[in-house]
Image (cartoon, rainbow, N blue to C red):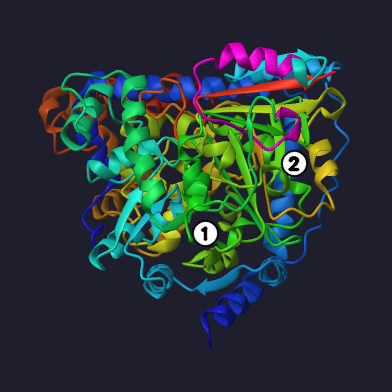
Amino acid sequence: MEHNNKDHATLASAFNVDEARVDWHDETLWFVREKRDRAVHIVPEWEALRETASQIKNNVLSNLHDYLLQFEKNAQQNGITVHWAADDKEHNQIVHSILQQNNINRIVKSKSMLTEECHLNNYLKSAGVDVVDTDLGERIVQLADEAPSHIVLPCIHWKKEEIGELFHQYLGTPKGNADPQFLTGAAREHLREKFLTRRAAITGVNFAIAETGEFVVCTNEGNADMGAHLADVHIACMGIEKIIPLQKHLGVFLRILTRSATGQPITTYSSHFRKPRKGQTLHIVIVDNGRSRQLGREDFRNSLKCIRCAACFNTCPVYRRSGGHSYHTAIAGPIGSILAPNLDMKDYADLPFASTLCGSCSNVCPVKIDIHQQLYKWRQVLVKDGYAPTAKKIAMKGMASTLASPGFYRFAGKMGRWVIKHFPFMVNNKLNAWYKHRDMPAPPKESFGEWYKKNRGKTE
Amino acid sequence: MSSREKILSGVKANQPSIKVLPEIENFVQPFTDVVEKFKTVLMAIGGNVHVVQNMADVIDVLKVQFADAARIISVVPEFNDYATLYQQGDDPHLLNDVDVAIIKAHFGVAENGSVWVTEAILQERVLPFICQHLVAVIDKKSIVPTMHEAYEQIAGTHYSFGTFIAGPSKTADIEQSLVLGAHGPKTMTVFILE
């Protein structure tokens, strides 16, 4: 596995080298969080909407088997071809085989975090298929050979001057031009040519409606629609948890999704695909990839309620100051940190620890996922199952035996105070992980126990 | 066992006991004038709005606004004197040079400034996305307060493709700087017919 040697703390310290950049990243995301607040506060029924959305999703998870069958049947009646993929590998193979059957080796793709999770781009690239990501942010990171660092704002970690340089190199824009309006215009021209010449388009799915067999795709740029409506073949990829029971439930979810994500009242386009266009074939790939396993984990199944708004990213003090790539997984941030250990406990054992457990993520979540509580629960599972980092395990064991023995506890306290007083460099050094981001306190002359014995113990 | 059966049996084995589906409450809105709300929100998200008496008024505005446009097409017969009537059948790629597309929308939604359109009125799905400027006409009486009423309107209708469009296409992917005109229209103008 490629992720084996990566961990959040190490990657975050690399991101933290440039302090001014960290501040800028932090402020940019907080700006998005504030936009969300303004949009949410003018909706008086906001809390009722969150509760309704949460209950609809609870119902979905409790009846997912039947809803999946209902959706499949209705989609097929609508003329859509439905495929099932047990894991990432099968998903990629299905997509590739559809392209092969249609003799297509150049495609456009709009945003789909599922295809990122499955590493579809790399798979297709090695199979000789040219994939162009058409969301502006995704195209930027694709040109730079990077993964998105945020699920809604893929290149939020890039500065406009750097994008100007990247476009100069790849799109031939004048050197030194970093005007967002100009650069967006250049990308518009560059990508329009792709829309007009690619015969297959891949999109994600925001919501799949069991009642009608239709699915909804939300974008601001219009890139999903430009791709899908001009292509002979449209392939939509969705996780099994994207199902909602009834069409009218879209009223609830479309009201909360974009307000939570960017502070807009709705995305520019909320497109409902029910039947293929005349002369077009329409495919849906329904993917499990560990989701049914997560459904069986009582403490973590709520993570499947996520609608991918990224409000938890924008509010998270750790995400804002460590950057999306420090999470080394397709879906970063607090929600990604509870999804990733389900995919691989060993590779992602570090992520539930990348949190202050402040609970802000749970407060802003539009479908009321108890994110910070699940992070806390994952820590317990990971330590119990032996996936915690070695240094942490040794420290925890040492602490446990110290706390279990009153005599040793008193001795260790004395020793600690003596060492800090006479040999501060013994603890104030780089080998002590605790010291890295903290100042050691001045040692007190005596412990509380000693003080109590002297001052209160006598009077008893 | 096929992947389909494997997934379905896994889901069945792991899904919790049934939780009841909630009713959606009837939420009363703080605004009473849906037309005003629609206008305010649509302008805030970058759209243009005009309240007009008839189609002749619409054409008067368009003649000024799009004086330089080379290709103006419409799917509404009332605009025959001003725009070329478009009907399904041509290769959709040929719409690439459309400067202005004029469409009708089924209704508007006050809380988010969007309009609902379906393939039946668009003729070609890509039309409202591929044009440089989009013009939509709605009836004043058709504006509903929220998305809940919107789906009451949509319920039971048979469309093969439908979309809510809220303003011009946009992106803020470069340093959160809002740019109108990402891949779709650079402007959207909605005419509200009295």
Q: Amino acid at mark 1?
A: Ala
Question: Which of the two residues, A27 or A212, is positioned nearer the viewer here?
Answer: A212
Image quadrant of residue A316? Answer: top left
Residue A149 visible in the current orientation: no
Q: Amino acid at mark 2?
A: Gly
Q: Which span is picked out in magenta?
A: B57-79
Question: Which of the two residues, B113 or A233, is positioned nearer the viewer here?
Answer: A233
Task: Give the quadrant of the N terminus of chain A.
Answer: bottom left
Mark 1 = which residue?
A: A236
Q: Position of residue A450 (x, y in %)?
A: 36, 27
Q: Chain of mark 2?
A: A
Which residue is found at the position 73% from the left and 27% from the top?
Answer: B137
- Look at the picture and state if A47 lies above or below A326: above
SS state under label 1: strand
Q: Nearer the viewer, mark 1 or mark 2?
A: 1
Q: Which mark is residue A350?
A: none
Q: Is residue B83 left or right of residue B116?
A: left
Q: How many residues crowd around disc 2 within 10 Å: few (fewer than 14), some, or many (20 or more)? A: some
Mark 2 = which residue?
A: A251
Which residue is found at the position 30% from the left and 18% from the top?
Answer: A179
Which residue is farthest bottom? B1
Which residue is found at the position 45% from the left and 59% from the top?
Answer: A381
Q: Position of residue B16 (x, y in %)?
A: 69, 66
Image quadrant of residue A283? Answer: bottom right
| Residue B104 forms part of the magenta stretch | no
Q: How many residues crowd around disc 1 within 10 Å: few (fewer than 14), some, or many (20 or more)? A: many
- Look at the picture and state if A159 lies above or below A284: above
Task: Give the quadrant of the C terminus of chain A.
Answer: top right
